[in-house]
Amino acid sequence: MTTTQLPHEAAPPPEVAASGPSGSAPPQRLAARAADATTDTGLALDLVIPVYNEGRTLEASVRRAHAYLTGSLPFRARLTIADNASTDDTLAVALRLADELPGLRVVHLDAKGRGRALHAAWGSSDAAVLAYMDVDLSTDLAALLPLVAPLLSGHSEVAIGSRLSAGSRVVRGPKRELISRSYNLILRGTLHARFSDAQCGFKAIRADAARQLLPLVEDTGWFFDTELLVLAEQAGLRIHEVPVDWVDDPDSRVDIVATATADLRGIWRLVRDLNAGRIPLDEVRAALPRRASDDQRPLSRRQTLLNQALSFGVVGALCTAAYALLFLLLRGSVGSQWANFLALAVTAVLNTGLNRRHTFGIRGSAGAARHHGQGLVVFGLGWALTAGSLAVLHTTAPGASGLAQLVVLCVANLCATLLRFVLFRSWVFAPRATEGSSR
């Protein structure tokens, strides 16, 4: 990594007489709190803009962000351009702007990856609060002060802009809206995440928390944000959410398919490593003991049910896909009924094991045999439901195609899945049935 850093900083802006952001202190008081929170350099905020091949649009965005930092914030702030391996004139434009604008730093990396760029820029910063936003400035800059105020005051360790909050104003297409909401539902179901928007390119973190968390974040691409938030939440840190005004960039070059695939791999890795205890979050809690205990409120019964239902749905979708594949592979050699039975048997064991660990949070071998035995009883009921539906199909439509059989069985299997969730929650993994197991 090559780093270019200019020595000049922005002068402190004049006092702002208007009221502060909703729910925060007025700017004069916030400036005093920022002074208490700043490092020896007196720098309160470092706002990073990660870029790759943005030479055409970089100057306008940087000038706009720089003007806001130097004219609208009641504390010292710096703007950092993190260029990760651009092949156009992005770096040349950034260096030219750094020569002209005081308080602008340029960090250049020889390898791509937004997460890699943020890791390098944040890791080399001397500011008390580290933030970033996308170069297209899709998020209204007016949300920056509400984003960093709770971090400077010590109320929270992490802050995120949320496009899914009730007070947000978002302009984007239905496809991006569906993808974003689906992704956050998956996070709630698999990792029990409580934050509402993992992907909004508008986040901030206290430097002391970043020093603890950044070494634990493995991803160097788009999943960096999600991984950082999940680890922060798992460590007990407070995550403050700010509703934002956000306008989708029609010129976005994000490869949705590749990004979604990488995100799913990242989710699987996090689930695996967290359940195996491979991530030393206890060290983070020990380093930030006061804040780590601030927000450890237990989930309400309604929240628990929702998280369990989401997790169960994700596991069920995976097992249904595995069931369909096994049924199609086996149907030609053993017939429809046996293919249904064998596919159900294999996926039932898989389903019970995944739900035991991920949906109901039960680890260790204690009670595992009983759980799987009860799971087989539930499987028997599900098999009776699906076999009965197949028998009805054969009676009413003897010449039904393989596709018709698969459709009927998938519908019946989804009904069996609903029954399985009810029995799992009320019988198999109910508290009275899990005594002695470790959660």
Image (cartoon, rainbow, N blue to C red):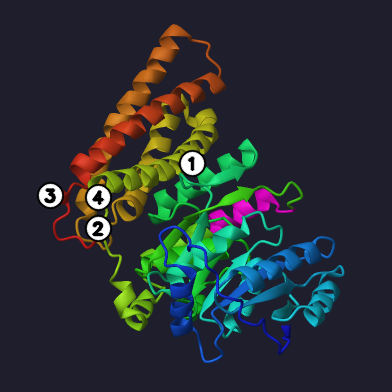
Report the Cα–Cα distance between label 1 and label 3.
31 Å
Q: Position of residue 415 (x, y in %)?
A: 36, 27
Residue indicated by mark 3 = 432
> In the rendering, which numbered label is found on residue 322?
1
In this rendering, which labeled residue sits more in front, label 3 or label 4? 4
Tell which circle, 1 or 3, labels the residue nearer the N-terminal end: 1
Query: The magenta stretch spans which residues?
Result: 253-265
Residue indicated by mark 2 = 298
Q: Position of residue 366 (x, y in %)?
A: 20, 60
Question: Mark 4 belongs to which amino acid?
Answer: Ser
- Relative to residue 65, is residue 268 drawn left or right? left
Report the Cα–Cα distance between label 2 and label 3.
20 Å
Q: State which quarter of the image contains the N terminus.
A: bottom right
Tell which circle, 4 or 1, labels the residue nearer the N-terminal end: 4
Secondary element under disc 3, as helix, strand or loop, is helix
Q: Is residue 276 visible?
A: no
Q: Residue at x 45, y 71 (%)?
A: 151
